[in-house]
């Protein structure tokens, strides 16, 4: 617990981790290339809010975007 894990995998592997709420950060690299076909990046059917926390662009045209999944606000956390 509390350790970082970095993994490469497809949309199905990512979805299995997301269902268990085990993902809190994404580092997404966008390459200046259109393949025209391929597999989706995400296979989850649920909407997930992301918050951009940093970005980096490179001379090659590559852009890296770092997102976190912001904590969900739970009204039950309030003492009323």
Image (spheres, helix red, strand yellow):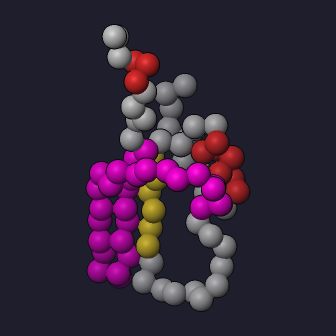
73, 27: nearer the viewer: 73
Percent x, y of residue 71: 41, 35
Q: What residue do we see at 49% from left, 27% from top? A: 2
Percent x, y of residue 79: 34, 10
Q: How many marks?
A: 0
Region in magenta: 42-69
Kindly indicate the quadrant of the structure image that contains residue 28: bottom left
Q: Is residue 26 visible?
A: yes
Q: What residue do we see at 37% from left, 65% from top? A: 64
- Position of residue 65 relative to residue 63, above or below, is above
Percent x, y of residue 72: 43, 35
Task: Answer whether residue 49 is magenta in the image.
Answer: yes
**Residue reaching furthest front?**
80
72, 30: nearer the viewer: 72
Task: Answer whether residue 59 is magenta in the image.
Answer: yes
Q: What residue do we see at 38% from left, 76% from top? A: 62
């Amino acid at each position: 617990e509390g350790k970082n894990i970095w993994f490469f995998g497809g949309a199905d592997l990512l979805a299995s981790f997301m269902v268990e709420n085990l993902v809190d950060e994404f580092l997404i690299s966008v390459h200046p290339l259109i393949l025209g076909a391929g597999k989706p990046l995400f296979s989850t059917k649920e909407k997930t809010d992301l918050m951009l926390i940093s970005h980096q662009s490179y001379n090659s045209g590559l852009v890296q975007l770092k997102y976190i999944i912001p904590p969900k606000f739970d009204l039950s956390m309030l003492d009323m």
